């Protein structure tokens, strides 16, 4: 049986880690910088999964994102238009980023989101600083050592 897929307004990019490819779910309102942050991560070797919309589903106590066929390999680059990009059709999610323009805590307590019955660590991130992509990459590697609390 195929897991039910939930469409989510987000961009997803994935990086190769010691545990295989792991993705980051980047969420925020329109114009928050989801595509821009994804593009900056892709400059560092990350791979696009989906830009602006992805299908999210749970399978064997893990959360995955897949790109809808209609937008596979396409990304909106502000000021340029829709451009073709290398992509992965799906990835296991390891982290959720909530983009914000509010002040972000320097040493935040872990926040966990429940998506499709799976706990996913979430980090609030201001995407405007030049270091935002490096912060996202550091967070992805840091969460690999974290254990999700019980539901």
Image: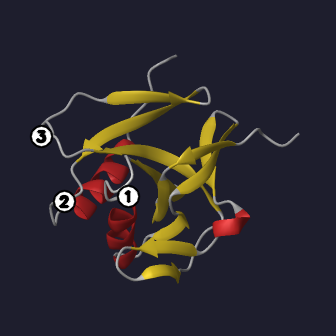
Per the model, the C-alpha gap separating discs 2 and 3 is 12 Å
Under circle 1, the secondary element is helix
- Residue 42 versus residue 52: which sits nearer the camera? 52
Under circle 2, the secondary element is loop
Q: Can you give x and y, in whole percent of width and height, for residue 57 in the image?
A: 67, 41
- Identify the residue at image location x=50%, y=58%: 52
Horizontal arrangement in the rendering, residue 61 relative to residue 14 (left or right): right
Q: Counting residues from the N terminus, which is met first, the one under dot 2 or under dot 1? A: 1
For disc 3, the marked residue is 103
Horizontal arrangement in the rendering, residue 149 relative to residue 116 (left or right): left
Q: Can you give x and y, in whole percent of width and height, for residue 16 in the image?
A: 48, 65
Residue 111, quarter of the rendered image: top left
Residue 34 numbered mark, or none: 1
Q: Can you give x and y, in whole percent of width and height, for residue 99 in the image?
A: 30, 47
Q: Quadrant of the N terminus?
A: top right
Above or below, 78 relative to 115: below
Q: Counting residues from the N terminus, which is met first, the one under dot 1 or under dot 3? A: 1
Horizontal arrangement in the rendering, residue 75 relative to residue 3 (left or right): left
Quick one: label 1, few (<14), some, or many (20+) residues within 10 Å? Answer: many
Per the model, the C-alpha gap separating discs 1 and 3 is 18 Å
- Identify the residue at image location x=56%, y=55%: 53
Is label 2 in contact with label 3 (beta carbons under 8 Å)? no
Residue 137 visible in the snapshot = yes
- Identify the residue at image location x=56%, y=79%: 86
- Residue 56 versus residue 17: which sits nearer the camera? 56
Residue 135, quarter of the rendered image: bottom left
Residue 128 numbered mark, or none: 2
């Amino acid at each position: 049986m195929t897991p039910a897929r939930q469409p989510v307004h987000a961009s997803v990019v994935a990086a190769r880690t010691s545990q295989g490819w792991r993705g980051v779910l980047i969420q925020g309102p329109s114009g928050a910088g989801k595509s821009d942050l994804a593009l900056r991560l892709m400059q560092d070797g990350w791979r696009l999964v989906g830009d602006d919309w992805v299908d999210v589903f749970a399978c064997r106590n893990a959360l995955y994102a897949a790109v809808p066929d209609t937008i596979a390999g396409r990304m909106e680059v502000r000021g340029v238009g829709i451009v073709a990009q290398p992509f992965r059709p799906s990835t296991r999610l390891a982290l959720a980023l909530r983009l914000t323009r509010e002040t972000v805590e320097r040493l935040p307590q872990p926040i966990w989101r429940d998506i499709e019955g799976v706990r996913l660590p979430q980090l609030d991130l201001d995407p405007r600083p030049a270091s935002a992509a490096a912060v996202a990459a550091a967070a992805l590697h840091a969460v690999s050592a974290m254990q999700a609390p019980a539901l």
